[in-house]
Amino acid sequence: MEAWFALLVGIFFSVAVYLMLSKFIIRVLLGVAVLGNGVNLLIFTGGRLTREVPPIIPEGAESLAAPAANALPQALILTAIVISFSFFAFLLVLSWRAYSDLATDNTDEMRVAEPADEPLPPLGY
């Protein structure tokens, strides 16, 4: 089962990189969201996927049984979900503001800080 999740994580990462290399802001935002989900799935897979043994330390033992799932990655994922959602909301508001001011979502057309009339900066010294 972990092999299928590893394949799914690889697909998530490749789709996220493809989307984030786009020149349109909405695709970049979707790529960031897919990348966050891929990282969460990677952490979840790293914590073992078993349903047979609950992650509870029995009385008198000092550690978990060998086939038990680790509860720490699951707690980390809950935190990561909140952080990634707030980061996505911030990026969404930032991109909406840029779109409303510049009337485009193409990053090549958003280069207003580089005037076309001035010469290019030196490429070397």
Image (cartoon, rainbow, N blue to C red):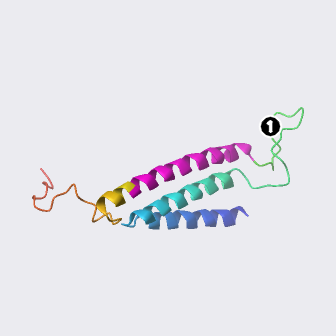
Identified at 35% across, 59% down, the residue is: 100
With 97 as the anchor, is 66 left or right in this view?
right
Q: Residue furthest front?
A: 100
Name the element at disc 1: loop
The answer to which of 80 and 42 lies nearer the viewer is 80
For this view, does 34 lie left or right of residue 49? left
- Location of residue 10 (image quadrant): bottom right
Residue 49 colored magenta? no
Q: Which residues are magenta?
A: 70-96
- Decide whether the magenta segment is chiefly helix, strand or loop: helix
From the viewer's perspective, tell me whether residue 53 is left or right of residue 88.
right
Q: Is residue 72 magenta?
A: yes
Q: Is residue 25 above or below residue 68?
A: below
Q: Residue at x 45, y 67 (%)?
A: 18
* Residue bearing the label numbered 1: 63
- Point out residue 44 in the picture as x, y percentages from the top left corner: 67, 53
With respect to residue 109, does 76 lie above or below? above
For the N terminus, give its image quadrant: bottom right
Count up the numbered dots: 1
Residue type at the position of mark 1: Ser
The structure residue drawn at horizontal position 43% and vertical position 62%, both measured from the top left corner, is 28
Q: Closest to the observer: 33 or 38?
A: 33
